[in-house]
Amino acid sequence: MAISIGCIVPAYNESRRINTVLRVLTAVQGLQTILVVDDGSTDGTADRLIRHPKLRVLRLPRNRGKAAAVLAGARQLRTDYLLLVDADLRRPRRAEFARALAALHTEPGVDMLVLRRVSKSLLTRSLRGDLLISGERIVRRGDLLAMLAQHPVQGYQLEVALNQYMLDHDKQVRWLPISSVGLLAIHKLGLRSGLRKELGMFRDIFKYLGLSKLLWQMLIFGRQQASSAE
């Protein structure tokens, strides 16, 4: 049976970077709709987007964070799966997204496919951050909505919350490598504000998981084989 795949790109003040991502995504065959959720931007992000028939925009009146933006987008799109992509992704490649979509068609039992940022630093990869907190992943819409309904998610907790939901419900998770990387907060905000934001990310993750579940994810999440499309 054919599956439908939509895409959500949550964005907050990404007017200078988001179109690089959108030009790649709009060239990917098989994406039904690409929905940019402007999370209360103040830099005119929504007004500076490229035009494309696949592209839609949802403007939120105020900044509420990534999880709230993704939830708003998931309520709008009615596809079987949702591809989540960060608006600040650097060096996105059409072929890598196309391969991920193809993997879902060859492995229809997969509940979540994580695009693993293998170009991350050695330290990040040793802590498995390239997999655990990758913002690029394809997830069943129903699972995403169920997780967000059951567990309030704030700040930087979305990815680890999805991981934990998959573990708790014995879902099928696979991963594929991608060469893209996210833009560090210090490059966006400067050293002091960027470090504060990065520390806030770790605080949010620890607050949601606690030590035991964090270690559990580091040890076992995604230990399943890579997708057969690898």
Image: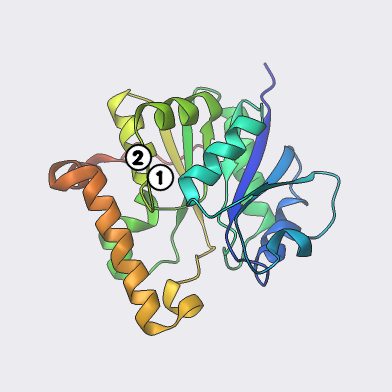
Residue 161 is labelled as: 2
Which image quadrant for residue 212?
A: top left
Residue 93 x %, y % = 65, 59
Residue 107, quarter of picture? top right
Look at label 2 and name its amino acid.
Ala
Residue depicted at x 85% and y 55%: 51
Going 25% across and 58% down the picture, which residue do you hit?
203
The residue indicated by pointer 1 is 158
Closer to us: 81 or 87: 87
Nearest the viewer among 36 and 58 is 58
Q: 203 or 108, which is in the foreground? A: 203
Amino acid type, residue under disc 1 in the picture:
Leu
Residue 67, position as x, y percentages in the image: 46, 45
Mark 2 and mark 1 residues within 8 Å of each other at the beta carbon: yes
C-alpha distance separating marks 2 and 1: 5 Å
Residue at far top of view: 1
As drawn, 226 above or below 151: below
Residue in view at x 38 percent, y 51 percent: 131
The color scheme shown is rainbow
